[in-house]
């Protein structure tokens, strides 16, 4: 670990006990899962076509949701960080809402808005014939809805902490606004941007409630890894556990991998 | 390091949990029931509570296979009622029930379409139409396995767009007119009222499922659990079930 040496004081024993209990909340369920893993059958279980389809679909949709979040979430973060306007706190509240809303509520809201009889989905269907529910596009949309807030808050925080004088200096030297954005602003917040993208991707990968409510559940079209776990839990528990282990390994890998960036950006 | 804080914490936690158990075990009867029983069991619970003052029936509805997994996994429940014998059997095998389950109701299937039937669905064979949005229950739950068995008997390969985790979520999407057709229980068509329309499936092809009920050994109040099972099987329980469209064994 680099950085300034911090003075550590030994905390009271009670703090350590409570901290251990806090850690146990996260670790015990994982141990329960690992204890049930049928290790010898693991390769065979993970080789099944349901697993393969779900993994492929999960990677595709979570990456698509992350790209879409970058395209529209970063501008949104920029607006929130740099512009002053009435109702800004309301806008920020709306952006953060999916973080606290039960995903199934988000899924139902998406269905009523973007379903083929929804207020936006109806006209969309009439004009283009596109039906989002029960489609892979619907999975991407559901994942974007729940995951994009992670990117917006991370990038907004970084933009606020950025010293605006760097951008001012670049502008004074004749750089266009786009040039300032791409050559000064974005490079300076790159660590936070990367952390935000990784979190967004991880959240999109784990998305369940909004997906099953809005996009349904069909192998190779809308059945992502979490949905496959849910369905398998009911009739094929060993496969469900194998899939769960796969998700834990992937998610933990991402979170550990971005550890340094995460600490620095917050 | 002193262990006293740890002891104090553990003791406090033990006292707190013991307190909770003591307060709730006498009054609350936890009934886990198949999603298709939602309306009928809400009615039965009200009638039972009226007869048994001091007993608070709490209902937990889910797909039968979820219920099975919950109970096998040790989730608290006093009475379990599932939508077919297959989901109940593992609980009997694991010796979790106090006696052999009793069949208290029977249900058949119907094709369900959103009210208005904009897609013009006329029967089971339309489920093969790939241009329609078709939903079934997942094959893991009884309404899904029954629907598949019926389609197999009819020689129809359904163009499925979604396998819903239980019949209620399938109904929600049919009512919202986001699906064109699905296969649900006849009782659901009755319960949903104006939201959906039912299209009968020919008797020669349709299949029925038996609903078994059992009290669990782990019941916090075994007597209340037995009384609830008896109530479901009683004339009054049967009346309520019949009113919601169930056939009676």
Image (tube, coloured by chain):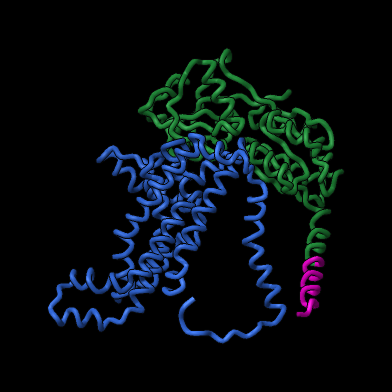
Left or right: A92 with respect to A39?
A: left
Q: From the image, which quarter does the C terminus of chain B lie in? A: top right
Q: Position of residue A8 (x, y in %)?
A: 59, 84
Q: From the image, which quarter does the N terminus of chain B lie in? A: bottom right
Q: Position of residue B117 (x, y in %)?
A: 41, 29
Furthest-top residue in view? Answer: B204
Q: Is residue A174 above or below residue B216?
A: below
Left or right: B33 with respect to A69?
A: right
**Quick one: B41 or A191, which is closer to the camera?**
A191
Furthest-right residue in view? Answer: B223
Question: Could you tell me if residue B168 is visible in this image?
Answer: no
Instruction: State yes or no: residue B8 in magenta.
Output: yes
Q: Position of residue A20 (x, y in %)?
A: 67, 69
Q: Main secondary structure of the magenta part?
A: helix
**Quick one: A228 or B28, which is closer to the camera?**
A228
Determine which quarter of the picture holds residue B225. Answer: top right
Query: Residue visible at 54% across and 53% down?
Result: A248
Q: Is residue B19 above or below residue B191?
A: below
Q: How many marks?
A: 0
Query: Chain B in the picture: what colour?
Result: green
**Quick one: A47 or A216, which is closer to the camera?**
A47
Determine which quarter of the picture holds residue A19. Answer: bottom right
Query: Chain A in the picture: what colour?
Result: blue
Q: Position of residue A129 (x, y in %)?
A: 28, 37
Query: Residue visible at 77% across and 67% down?
Result: B13
Question: Could you tell me if residue A255 is visible in this image?
Answer: yes
Q: Which residues are magenta?
A: B1-15
Instruction: State yes or no: residue A78 in magenta.
Output: no
Query: Residue visible at 61% across and 24% down?
Result: B108
Q: Is residue B193 above or below residue B205?
A: below
Query: Residue visible at 28% across and 70% down?
Result: A186
């Amino acid at each position: 670990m680099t950085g300034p040496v911090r003075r550590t004081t030994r905390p009271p024993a009670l703090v350590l006990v409570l901290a251990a209990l806090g850690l146990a909340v996260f670790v015990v369920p994982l141990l329960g899962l690992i204890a049930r893993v049928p290790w010898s059958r693991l390769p065979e279980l993970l080789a099944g076509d349901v697993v393969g389809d779900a993994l492929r679909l999960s990677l595709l949709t979570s990456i698509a949701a992350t790209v879409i979040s970058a395209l529209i979430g970063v501008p949104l973060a920029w607006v929130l960080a740099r512009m002053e306007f009435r109702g800004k706190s309301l806008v920020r509240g709306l952006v953060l809402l999916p973080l606290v809303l039960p995903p199934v509520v988000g899924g139902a809201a998406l269905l009523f808005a973007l379903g083929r009889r929804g207020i936006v989905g109806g006209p969309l269907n009439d004009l283009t014939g596109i039906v989002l529910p029960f489609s892979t596009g619907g999975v991407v949309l559901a994942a974007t809805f729940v995951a994009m807030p992670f990117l917006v808050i991370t990038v907004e925080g970084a933009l606020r902490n950025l010293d605006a004088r760097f951008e001012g200096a670049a502008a004074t030297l004749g750089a266009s606004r786009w040039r300032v954005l791409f050559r000064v602003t974005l490079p300076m917040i790159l660590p936070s941007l990367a952390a935000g993208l990784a979190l967004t991707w991880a959240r999109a990968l784990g998305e369940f409630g909004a997906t099953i409510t809005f996009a349904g559940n069909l192998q190779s079209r809308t059945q992502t890894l979490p949905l496959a776990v849910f369905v398998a839990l009911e009739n094929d528990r060993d496969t469900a556990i194998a899939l769960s282990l796969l998700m834990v390994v992937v998610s933990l890998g991402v979170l550990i991998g971005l550890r340094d960036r995460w600490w620095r950006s917050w | 390091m002193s262990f006293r804080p740890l002891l104090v914490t553990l003791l406090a936690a033990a006292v707190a949990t013991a307190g909770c158990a003591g307060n709730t075990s006498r009054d609350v009867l936890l009934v886990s029931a198949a999603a298709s029983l939602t309306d009928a069991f809400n009615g039965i619970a009200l009638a039972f509570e009226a007869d048994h003052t001091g007993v608070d029936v709490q209902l937990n509805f889910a797909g039968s296979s979820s219920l099975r997994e919950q109970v096998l996994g040790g989730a608290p429940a006093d009475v379990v009622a599932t939508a077919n014998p297959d989901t109940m059997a593992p609980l009997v095998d694991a010796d979790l029930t106090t006696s052999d389950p009793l069949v208290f109701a029977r249900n058949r299937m119907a094709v369900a379409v959103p009210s208005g039937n904009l897609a013009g669905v006329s029967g089971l064979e339309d489920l093969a139409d790939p241009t329609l949005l078709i939903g079934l229950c997942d094959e893991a739950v009884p309404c899904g396995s029954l629907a598949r068995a019926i389609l197999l008997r009819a020689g129809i390969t359904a163009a499925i767009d979604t396998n819903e985790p239980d019949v209620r979520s399938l109904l929600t999407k049919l009512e919202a007119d986001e699906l064109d057709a699905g296969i649900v229980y006849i009782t659901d068509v009755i319960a949903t009222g104006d939201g959906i329309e039912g299209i009968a499936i020919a008797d020669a092809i349709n299949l029925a499922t038996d609903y078994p009920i059992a009290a669990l050994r782990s019941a916090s109040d075994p007597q209340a659990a037995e009384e609830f099972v008896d109530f479901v099987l009683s004339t009054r329980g049967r009346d309520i079930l019949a009113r919601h469209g169930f056939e009676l064994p």
